């Protein structure tokens, strides 16, 4: 059952005559995870209006984390690396963030560090042309893929833009390779600016459910993630696992993806999220 349906059934079936253990069990069923379910059940208790109490609790977890992704103009360029598993929407989010920053008057360059798939660089090239951004590309003139870290280095050395957004690969031969490559990109950026990257944003797919927690944990092992973007909230996914991610990692939530165009990025709204959960 989806998180949404489970939550709906909690709201529909829960009566205040149930015990704390029962509430805890239902919350575990609803993908809150064992730890958070226990905490919530303890705090909410079985008295009063469970719906309201649960909503208040979810709001208390999420609201403090909602944040803008802000450019620090002292950093030039301000470097943002997007990371995440394959298909989570990284490349599309490069375009969304570029559009978002350009509307605020910042110039943006893009870097196609997913050099392993030709299609990945081409996908970003289409966005770069459409948004009129300079692109640092993942293949040299012979068509041979560039090494991602060396491309990132070249981009940061040469970019004159306000913001530099670096797209990365989501899948390599194995996880260790992917993580090593990301670590290397960070290392070379620091050779030029030891405070770079200024943001490392993990891109999550709202349809992945509880696997989200694992993803945050894995990427955090390599270097600190500074914020999250939750994509594909326009579909059936309700992104319920985000509550658990938020509770566990306390990372800023920079926005949500609600479609495939550059304009489909907006601030996370707790009200909208809660409405979707209970309506
Ligand atoms: N419906 C929807 N589709 C999205 C969203 N973000 C990305 N996509 C689509 O998801 C697919 C994978 O996106 P992509 O940016 O290539 O993911 P990447 O592998 O992480 O770079 C593409 O077909 C995108 O158009 C979103 O917010 N909503
Ligand atoms: Mg991509």
Image (tube, helix red, strand yellow):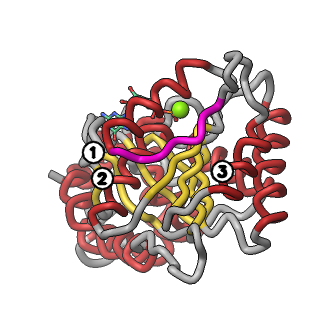
Query: Which residues are the magenta region?
Result: 132-138
Residues 76 and 79: in front is 76
The residue indicated by pointer 3 is 155
**Residue sitting at x 63%, y 69%:** 198
Labels 3 & 2 near each other (Cβ < 8 A): no
Disc 1 residue crowd, few under 14, some 14–19, many 20+, Cα 10 Å: some
Position of 188 compared to 80: left or right? right
Which label sits on residue 258? 1
Of residues 175 and 277, the one drawn nearer to the viewer in this rendering? 175
Give the vertical position of 42 relative to 173 (above or below).
Answer: below
Asked which secondary structure carries label 3, the reply is helix
Coordinates of residue 51 in the picture (x, y in percent): 25, 66
Between the residue at mark 3 and the residue at mark 2, the CA separation in whole angstroms equals: 25 Å
Q: Which mark is residue 265?
A: 2
Query: Of label 1 and label 2, which has the lower sequence position?
Result: 1
Q: Which residue is drawn at 39% across and 30% down?
A: 126
Choose the circle earlier in sequence order: 3 or 1. Answer: 3
Confirm or deny contact between disc 1 and disc 2 (CB under 8 A): yes
The alpha-carbon separation of the residues under discs 1 and 2 comes to 6 Å
Say which of marks 3 and 2 sits in front: 3
Task: Check mark 2 vs ligand 1: CB closer than 8 Å? yes or no.
Answer: yes
């Amino acid at each position: 059952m989806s998180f949404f349906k489970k939550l709906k059934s909690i709201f529909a079936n829960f009566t205040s005559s149930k015990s704390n253990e029962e509430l805890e069990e239902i919350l575990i069923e609803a993908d809150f995870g064992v730890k958070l379910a226990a905490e919530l059940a303890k705090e909410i208790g079985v008295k009063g209006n469970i719906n309201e109490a649960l909503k208040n609790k979810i709001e208390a977890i999420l609201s403090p984390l909602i944040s803008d992704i802000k450019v620090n103009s002292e950093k030039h360029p301000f470097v943002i690396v997007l990371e995440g598993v394959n298909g989570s929407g990284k490349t599309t989010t490069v375009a969304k963030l570029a559009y978002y920053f350009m509307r605020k008057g910042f110039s943006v360059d893009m870097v196609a560090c997913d050099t392993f798939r030709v299609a990945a660089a081409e996908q970003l090239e289409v966005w770069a042309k459409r948004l009129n951004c300079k692109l640092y590309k993942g293949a040299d003139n012979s068509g041979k893929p560039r090494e991602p870290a060396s491309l990132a280095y070249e981009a940061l050395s040469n970019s004159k833009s306000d913001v530099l957004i670096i797209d990365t690969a989501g899948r390599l031969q194995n996880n260790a390779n992917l993580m090593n490559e990301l670590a290397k990109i960070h290392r070379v950026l620091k050779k030029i600016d030891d405070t770079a990257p200024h943001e490392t944003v993990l891109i999550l797919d709202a349809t992945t459910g509880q696997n989200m927690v694992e993803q945050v944990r894995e990427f955090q092992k390599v270097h600190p993630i500074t914020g999250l973007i939750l994509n594909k909230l326009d579909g059936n996914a309700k992104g319920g696992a985000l509550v658990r991610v938020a509770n566990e990692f306390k990372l800023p939530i920079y926005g949500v993806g609600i479609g495939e165009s550059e304009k489909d990025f907006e601030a996370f709204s707790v009200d909208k999220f809660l409405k979707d959960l209970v309506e």
